[in-house]
Image (cartoon, rainbow, N blue to C red):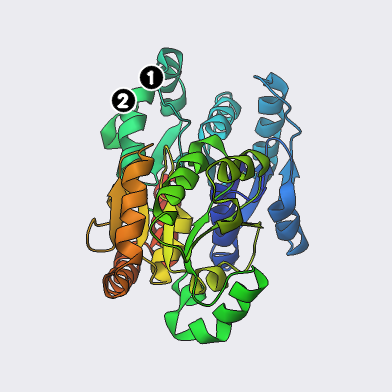
């Protein structure tokens, strides 16, 4: 089966990493081409180095009909059985490219996440139902929350949407290998004492991740927990958060680690995972933390309630409520036995519902169902 994947680019992002890993895992089963509307990105370069055909269309901004024309020509050249578009803009371009074709490949639309705040878009509802859905055989949402938004705000019938949760590779986050990851050495390298109680967040510095609420929550917890430290892993502008931490009197207790590739080791060196997102789909970093047997303290938004069982695998708090999150930090860090129970339960939950293999089988099933026969 020949497949074309259409994305914005292949930078280091959630959807892009998932597609990259999918191509690697299914190279013996599928013949796949990647099309980047904008730029190639490091993951695209990696795929090219491995022999995968990666095309870049050079879109800049706004609606560009020439990009749809170029994509049309590329699809005609490759003659795939199915086109899989990841996120709405690539989906709209794929649908436009397929429109003039007499013999169209199947089209799959995978929605990985939504802008915040999400609102109903009447023009898109009309376009979806009059045009795009005419060419679409499968729609995949990465969680039930995303499915609901596609119905409410995009006008896509619920009967057309399947939920395939994101998944992660359990072998990368095996608790039996924790000692070999040298958590003490990781802590030392980050300037964290062996006695520190480490709250870790792995997320890019973007407004939707709401790091300010997380820092404010930590400042609440820090008043009662002298050994607590907040470890922030991710890329972006650190300056506003550094200033906020200093203003709140915890500047010397918040560690900025930047972008890291040793995430299993980071979690091995942590006591608690926390994230204050305003919106989420199926958070891969949350799943990875749970696989690492770390209890999860996250906001009750998006797909988080579908992943975290409150009181069993972690805790959910209201969006933007730093006081509630801070109180939960204190309660969890004061109870190591409870954290251990939650961590073990969290790993079992991910192994049961959110593995990479399960996700890949769901994607392959969608592609097979949509493929032109």
For label 1, the crowd category at 10 Å Cα-Cα, with few meaning under 14, some 14 to 19 and many 20 or more, is some
Residue at the spot 32% in from the left edge and 67% down from the top edge: 334
Q: Kindly indicate the quadrant of the structure image that contains residue 320.
A: top left
Q: Earlier along the polypeptide chain: callout 1 or callout 2? A: 1
Res. 244 visible in picture:
yes
Q: Kindly indicate the quadrant of the structure image that contains residue 192.
A: bottom right
Q: Which residue bears the numbered disc 1?
A: 120
Residue at the spot 34% in from the left edge and 41% down from the top edge: 301
Q: CA distance from mark 1 to mark 2?
A: 7 Å
Instruction: Locate residue 21 relative to residue 138 in the image: left or right.
Output: right
Most extreme residue toward the left is 311
Res. 373 visible in picture:
no
Residue 34 at x, y = what percent? 65, 48
Query: Please, what secondary structure does the residue beneath circle 1 have?
Result: loop
Residue 257 at x, y = what percent? 64, 59
Q: Kindly indicate the quadrant of the structure image that contains residue 83.
A: top right
Say whether marks 1 and 2 touch (CB < 8 Å): yes
Q: Which residue bears the numbered disc 2?
A: 152
């Amino acid at each position: 089966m020949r497949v074309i994947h259409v994305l914005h680019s292949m930078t280091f992002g959630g959807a892009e990493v998932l597609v990259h890993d999918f191509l690697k895992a299914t190279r013996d089963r599928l013949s796949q081409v990647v099309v980047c509307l904008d730029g190639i990105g490091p993951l695209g370069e990696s795929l090219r180095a491995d022999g995968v055909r990666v095309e870049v269309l050079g879109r800049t901004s706004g609606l560009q009909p020439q990009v749809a024309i170029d994509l049309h020509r590329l699809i005609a050249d490759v003659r795939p059985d199915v086109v899989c578009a990841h996120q709405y803009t690539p989906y709209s371009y794929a649908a436009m490219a397929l429109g003039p074709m007499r013999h169209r490949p199947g089209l799959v639309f995978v929605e990985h996440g939504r802008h915040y705040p999400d609102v109903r878009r009447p023009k898109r509802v009309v376009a979806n139902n009059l045009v795009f859905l005419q060419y679409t055989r499968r729609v995949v949402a990465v969680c039930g929350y995303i499915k609901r938004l596609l119905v409410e705000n995009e006008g896509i019938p619920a009967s057309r949407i399947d939920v395939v949760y994101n998944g992660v590779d359990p072998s990368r986050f095996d608790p039996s290998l924790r000692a070999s990851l040298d958590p003490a050495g990781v802590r030392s390298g980050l300037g964290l004492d062996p006695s520190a109680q480490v709250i870790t967040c792995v997320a890019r510095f973007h407004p939707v991740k709401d790091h300010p609420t997380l820092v404010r929550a930590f400042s609440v917890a820090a008043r009662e927990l002298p050994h607590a430290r907040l470890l922030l892993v991710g890329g972006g502008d650190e300056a506003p958060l550094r200033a906020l931490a200093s203003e709140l009197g915890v500047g010397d207790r918040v560690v900025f680690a930047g972008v890291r590739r040793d995430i299993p080791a980071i979690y091995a060196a942590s006591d608690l995972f926390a994230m204050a997102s305003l919106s989420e789909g199926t958070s891969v970093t949350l799943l990875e933390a749970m696989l690492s047997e770390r209890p999860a303290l996250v906001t009750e938004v998006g797909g988080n309630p579908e992943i975290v069982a409150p009181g069993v695998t972690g805790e959910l708090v209201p969006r933007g409520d730093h006081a509630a999150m801070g109180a939960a930090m204190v309660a969890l860090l004061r109870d190591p036995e409870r954290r251990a129970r939650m961590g073990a339960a969290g790993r079992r939950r991910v192994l049961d519902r959110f593995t990479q293999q399960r996700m890949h089988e769901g994607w392959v099933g969608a592609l097979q169902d949509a493929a032109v026969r």
